[in-house]
Each structure stands twice: as C-alpha cells, then as structure tokens.
Image (spheres, rainbow, N blue to C red):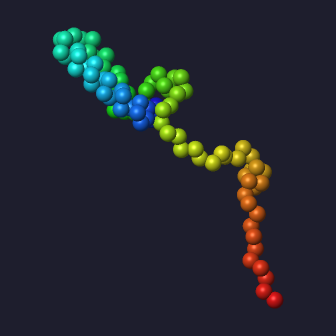
Amino acid sequence: MCMKKNVGGADRTIRIVLGLAILGVGVYFKSWWGLIGLIPLLTGLFSYCGLYSLLGLSTCKSKTPAPAASSPAEAVAAKPPVQEPPKQA
C-alpha cells in the first residue's frame, strides 16, 4: 500500500494543532476521549488521510505534469517541427 501525500499546507498545520489541543484537553480532564486527538495529529504528521484517499480528495499543491499522449500518433503530432539551419551557398 503506497501512502501518497494528500494533506498539505494549512490543512496539515490545523490538524497538528487541533490534535495536540484535543490530547491536551484529554490529559487535563483525565479522560480517555483525549485519545481521539491522535487521529488529526497523526494524519497531520504523516500528511496522509485515509478518508481523503477514499473520497479522492487532496489539499496538497499539485504538480501538474504535461498531459501524456494517448497514442504514438498524438506524441509525434505534439512535437514542434524541427527547424534546420539555413544552408550556406
């Protein structure tokens, strides 16, 4: 299973801060409910959220590569023509 990053930037920061806050409240009130804070904390630290993966969501900035040609003919057609240097007389 490949865990591709799908939590980025502000989302990651919010998850880490919120996770630590929930854990802190759980410790303060001596409640096991504070362990719920591990979920946002770990998803923030690992930059991966299983729910985002299931829903096909991502908050990472995407690096959009050039679209791949679906056939060899399209690949040839997509290349610019080669200009030959002028011939000297």
Residue 30 occupies quadrant: top left
| Residue at 74%, 54% in the rendered image | 78
Q: Position of residue 41 (x, y in %)?
A: 32, 26
| Residue at 50%, 26% in the rendered image | 53
Relative to 72, say whether 15 is above or below. Answer: above
Image side of residue 87 versus residue 46, left or right? right
Q: Position of residue 46 (x, y in %)?
A: 37, 33
Image side of residue 43 versus residue 27, left or right? right
Residue 21 in view (yes/no): yes
Q: Position of residue 65 (x, y in %)?
A: 59, 47
Relative to 69, say whether 42 is above or below. Answer: above
Q: Nearer the viewer, residue 70 or 59?
A: 59
| Residue at 63%, 48% in the rendered image | 66
| Residue at 40%, 33% in the rendered image | 10
Image side of residue 21 versus residue 40, left or right? left
In the rendered picture of this protein, how many numbered marks are placed on residues?
Answer: 0
Residue farthest bottom in this picture: 89
Residue 21 occupies quadrant: top left
Query: On the rendered image, what quadrant is the C terminus found in?
Result: bottom right
Residue 2 in view (yes/no): no
Q: Position of residue 37 (x, y in %)?
A: 30, 20
Relative to 30, say whether 56 is above or below. Answer: below
